[in-house]
Amino acid sequence: MKLQSFNYWMANLSRLTVEDVLQVLASHCSLNEADKGFFGLAHVDDRHNYFWLDEETVIANLSFSGEPPGKIHLTHSIRYFVDSIYSLSNAVTIELLFLEIHRQLYKGELLTNGGVYAKAAALLMRVYDSDIANEETALSLLHCILPIPPPKRVFAYFNGSENQMEGEIFSIYCAYRNIPRGDAMLNFLQLISTWPRYGCRHYTVLDTDKNSCLLAVSNRGLSLYENKDSIKPNKVYTWDVLDNLYYKDNEFMIEVRIIGMPKKNNFEQPSLDCSMLSEDDALAQAVLDPTTQVTLSRRPAAKIFLQTFECTTPKLAKCIWKTAIAQHQFYLEQKNVRF
């Protein structure tokens, strides 16, 4: 079992549930009661899709293709990202959030323009080392903590010049060299939290035109990116415009309400029963057609349209649905805390 950058092996799992394992790991990491709910246990497939496990799931009952007999590889990671790092009071939680953000940045899951990327890289260098004697040593550290060459958008900002990028990062690092490590970490997290892809888990799907795209799920809602190199989303569906979520076979579907229509009160109760959805999009479109005769109790609002995403497997469609429902619940809980 991988715990951030640590391996944690557990045996005799026949009676343990996911909740039991989370308790063990929370104790191992010294997480307090308030913060341990931000974390979850997931199986990550070869496409980097996060399949979050329900707490009541018995570990011994799990099986995944590609895993050796008698062994399963699970990832303990942050499942719910807070909007503001200042809502976290436990230093351990902040450190684990930092490690997760650094991992995402290294893998290219977090993107921004080159200038902001350089600032984030400089802060990252300060967190790991505050006493770099010369530029050569600094660049050696940089090559260890960030991908070189950087993402395409970042590289283009520096005119495709690695030397130009490294020089700017080192210059910014020199300005941060004397600030405390904790302040550098907080500044890094605060900077990253303003990026559109912060707090998201990404899933590759096909849109209604059969174009491959990236569907991002977070506590803010759903976002659609053209590809993995996109910095800004093409479409954003916040929770206040999403009426319902569905999955059927290998399709994940959302009901989107046009802004200006009265908001429904109950997110969990669907206005269109899943059994009415078609085997393909034809019936779904027919149901939404104003000339179609259906009972009023099942007929969707006139200003709601159905957006369908095609997934590689039914398992992935269900995974995205469960992830979105959980993120919406977290959004509601955080909203209640604020107000």
Image (spheres, rainbow, N blue to C red):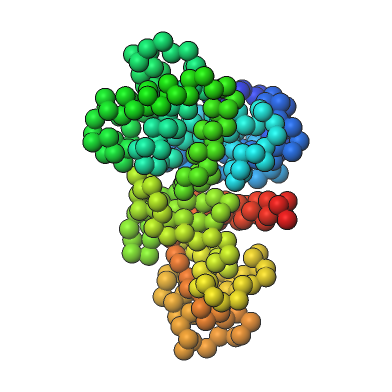
Residue 127 position in % (x across, y down): 52, 23
Residue under the image location 58 percent in, 65 percent down: 240
Residue 146 position in % (x across, y down): 40, 27
Front residue of this view, candidates 58 and 255: 255
Instruction: Tell me where residue 276 sits by quadrant.
Output: bottom right
Q: Quadrant of the C terminus?
A: bottom right
Q: Quadrant of the N terminus?
A: top right
Residue 130 position in % (x across, y down): 50, 16
List the single residue furthest toward the right: 33
| Relative to 18, residue 257 above or below | below
Instruction: Tell me where residue 243 sits by quadrant.
Output: bottom right
| Relative to 136, residue 68 above or below | below
| Relative to 169, residue 321 above or below | below
Residue under the image location 43 percent in, 13 percent down: 132
Front residue of this view, candidates 128 and 19: 128
Residue under the image location 71 percent in, 52 percent down: 338
Front residue of this view, candidates 51 and 149: 149
List the single residue furthest toward the top: 133
Can residue 148 be seen here?
no
| Relative to 199, residue 171 above or below | above
Can residue 232 be seen here?
yes
Residue under the image location 31 percent in, 29 percent down: 165
Residue 213 position in % (x across, y down): 37, 53
- Is 329 on the left or on the right of 318, as rendered? right
Instruction: Tell me where residue 181 sits by quadrant.
Output: top right
Front residue of this view, candidates 305 and 191: 191
Q: How many marks?
A: 0
